[in-house]
Image: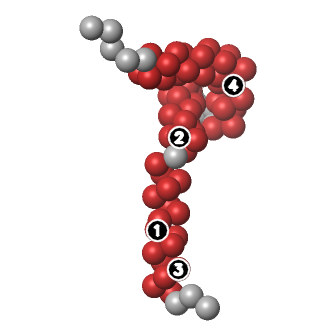
């Protein structure tokens, strides 16, 4: 059986792995866009529209174009600079 110190190190290692993963970084970037959308739409409505409503609205109206833009940016960064 592992002791608590070993388990803590293992959990910390897993946590760092997750935080450094591309999937987690994409999740955080998407969440940030949803929160911006929530703020903008709440300002327009004059009241907080809530995260769920903002999420669904953002998915329908913006997610596809946002993802396409992100993919283009990644491809541009991956291309070697032409001298």
**SS for dot 3:** helix
Q: Which residue lies furthest to the left in this view?
A: 83
Circles 2 and 3, Cβ within 8 Å, touching? The answer is: no
Checking the image for residue 22, the label placed there is: 2
- Percent x, y of residue 74: 48, 23
> Could you say which is closer to the camera, residue 8 or residue 2?
2
- Percent x, y of residue 10: 51, 72
**SS for dot 1:** helix
Number of the front mark, 4 or 2: 2
Q: Which of marks 2 and 3 is nearer the N terminus?
A: 3
> Could you say which is closer to the camera, residue 18 or residue 40?
18
Circles 3 and 4, Cβ within 8 Å, touching? The answer is: no
Number of the front mark, 1 or 4: 1
Quadrant that contains the N terminus: bottom right
Checking the image for residue 58, the label placed there is: none
Q: Residue furthest front?
A: 83
Q: Residue at x 37, y 17 (%)?
A: 80
Alpha carbon separation for disc pair 1 and 4: 33 Å
- Percent x, y of residue 82: 32, 9
Q: In this view, does 70 lie above or below 13?
A: above
Checking the image for residue 59, the label placed there is: 4
Q: Is residue 62 above or below residue 52?
A: above
Alpha carbon separation for disc pair 2 and 3: 25 Å
Alpha carbon separation for disc pair 1 and 2: 18 Å
Question: What residue would you read off at disc 1?
Answer: 12
Q: Which of marks 3 and 4 is nearer the N terminus?
A: 3
């Amino acid at each position: 059986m592992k002791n608590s110190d070993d388990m803590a190190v293992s959990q910390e290692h897993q946590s760092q792995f997750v935080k450094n993963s591309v999937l987690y970084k994409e999740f955080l970037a998407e969440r940030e866009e949803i929160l911006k959308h929530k703020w903008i739409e709440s300002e327009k409505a004059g009241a907080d529209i809530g995260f769920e409503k903002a999420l669904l609205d953002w998915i329908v109206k913006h997610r596809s174009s946002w993802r396409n833009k992100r993919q283009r940016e990644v491809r541009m960064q991956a291309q070697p600079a032409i001298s």
